[in-house]
Structure formats: structure tokens, C-alpha cells
Amino acid sequence: MSLTSVFEIAELDCVMPSAGIEICSVDQAGVTEFRIPASHETNLVYIAPNTVEDLFTHHFQTDQLLVVSGSIVLVVLLNGDYHYIVMDDRHPRVVKIPPNIPHGVINLSPNVCVAVNSIIRHGAPDERDYRSIKPPFPYHLSRVRELLEQAEDA
């Protein structure tokens, strides 16, 4: 049995907080276990290979996502534009998505992606929060591929 290093996330370096989305980098030097901010519920999510999800809008929860294996592109719809956020296990970061922000994921790889979703509840769960909605316009998959290639080269 071996000891595991634990990294407590206290002060996160976050970008885009004015838009409601927070992208918080994680210092991973010598770390094998992460503790993401407190939550009411934590789920392990498997995103199938070659998946392009529709959007979801949660009205009573904040999602806190961390990819632990593989890679995805998180799609966030803000002010009528898609924002694409590459998330992978090589460059771990927590992305916090507050209520009422449409979001979905794209996994263009041939591998399953595993992510942790640490949920903060702002009211009782509502079944409408888990129904997908069609994107109002198509995703820019060529841009998604370009971002994934850039992440691979980094």
C-alpha cells in the first residue's frame, strides 16, 4: 500500500469570472489526487468516443467539471456565441458553470473521456434541467479539431 499525495485547492487562478464561467488551473506538480471545491453531489461521468452532445441548461445547479482521463471540448453558449474549452488529463483544470448557462461536450477522440462533475445545488433538482436542447446553430467542429490539435502540441 502506498501513500498518496493530496493537493487541496484553495486559491485557484481563474479566468472569465465576469462571464459567469470560471476556468481554474490546477497545479499538478507531484499530485496524484485532487480535491475540487465542496459540493452537494459528485458524479463520475463517462463521455463516449466520437460524441457530440446537445446543450443542457441547469437552472438550479452549478457544475464543477474536472477531466481525469482523456479529453473533451466543453461548449458554452454565452451572449449568442459558442466558447470552446479544451479539457484533458494532461492539463487539469476545474471549470465552473453556473445556473442558466447552456453547455455541452464534444469528444472527437476514439477513447472514452472520464470526468468528475461536482455539483452545487441552488434548489431542488428539476427533471427539465437534464433534458437536452438542440443547439441554436451548428457547432464549429473544424474549430474544435483545431483546438484539440493545439492542445496535443502543447
Image (tube, rainbow, N blue to C red):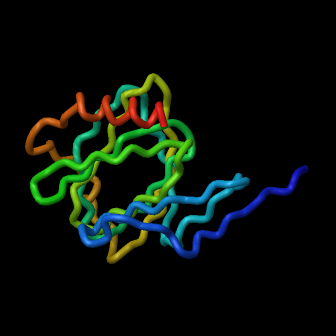
Q: Is residue 57 left or right of residue 32?
A: left
Q: Residue at x 34, y 36 (%)?
A: 147
Residue 42, above or below 60: above
Q: Position of residue 77 (x, y in %)?
A: 19, 53
Q: Is residue 34 left or right of residue 51?
A: right
In this view of the protein, which residue sits in the foreground, 146 or 34?
146
Residue 87, above or below 150: below
Query: Which quarter of the figure has residue 20?
Result: bottom left
Q: Position of residue 99 (x, y in %)?
A: 27, 68
Residue 72, above or below 59: above
Query: Which quarter of the figure has residue 65?
Result: bottom left
Query: Number of numbered discs present?
Result: 0
Q: Residue at x 49, y 32 (%)?
A: 112
Q: Position of residue 44 (x, y in %)?
A: 52, 50
Name the residue at the front extreme: 154
In this view of the protein, which residue sits in the foreground, 15 or 103?
15
Q: Residue at x 22, y 56 (%)?
A: 102
Q: Is residue 41 left or right of residue 125?
A: right
Name the residue at the right extreme: 1
Q: Position of residue 126 (x, y in %)?
A: 28, 65
In this view of the protein, which residue sits in the foreground, 143 or 80?
143
Q: Residue at x 24, y 67 (%)?
A: 19
